[in-house]
Image (spheres, rainbow, N blue to C red):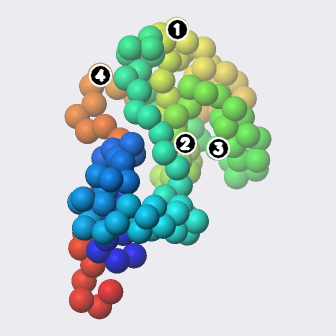
Amino acid sequence: MDKIDRKIVNILQKNARASLKDLSKECFISSPAIAARISKLERSGVIKGYQATINLEKIDFHVKAFIQVQLEPHQKKEFYPYVQQIPNVIECNCVTGDFSEVMEVVFPSTTDLDNFINDIQQRFGKTSTQIVFSTSVNHRGVQLSEPTEKE
């Protein structure tokens, strides 16, 4: 990735709807050249997709939490497909430490969250839950720096 690719990625992370015309002005190259670079970034897997950021409270999801789950290695083959099909699980990560999985979840109410936690405990075992009171930094992209001389 060169300087222009990095600039394109930075702009698209802030606004995935940025027009080719706007990107062209920012990068000082033609719109067709921008389109070709974006296609190349998509094909290479640098750009995996595009999505809208939703205000969850506006759609009545008022409870966000992090749930840690302690799994035995053999449970993963059942756990992964299970959480994959739960739309309230917005992210799940395999981690180090006392718990092997950390899920970020959203629910309309604490009752819904409690029901989900009970289901997880009955199926898989021990959990630890932290309910989010507020978020100081929302999900965001990674700002790509200028390439070094070696690049």
Q: How far apart are marks 1 and 2 (CA)?
A: 21 Å
Q: How far apart are marks 1 and 3 (CA)?
A: 24 Å
In the rendered structure, which disc, 2 or 4, sits on the residue that comes first in sequence?
Answer: 2
Is residue 132 toward the left or the right of residue 120 in the image? left
* Residue 136, horizontal then vertical, whole percent: 23, 34
In the rendered structure, which disc, 1 or 2, sits on the residue that comes first in sequence?
Answer: 2
Residue placed under numbered mark 2 in the picture: 92
Residue placed under numbered mark 1 in the picture: 111
Confirm or deny contact between disc 1 and disc 2 (CB under 8 A). Answer: no
Confirm or deny contact between disc 2 and disc 4 (CB under 8 A). Answer: no
Q: Nearer the viewer, residue 35 or 129?
A: 35
Name which residue type carries label 3: Leu
In the rendered structure, which disc, 3 or 4, sits on the residue that comes first in sequence?
Answer: 3
Residue 79 visible in image? no
Q: Distance between the residues labelled 1 and 4?
A: 16 Å
Residue 126 visible in image? yes
At label 1, counting other C-alpha atoms closer than 10 Å, the crowd grade (few under 14, some 14-19, many 20 or more) is few
What label sits on residue 133 in the rendered view?
4
* Residue 32, horizontal then vertical, whole percent: 43, 64
At label 2, counting other C-alpha atoms closer than 10 Å, the crowd grade (few under 14, some 14-19, many 20 or more) is some
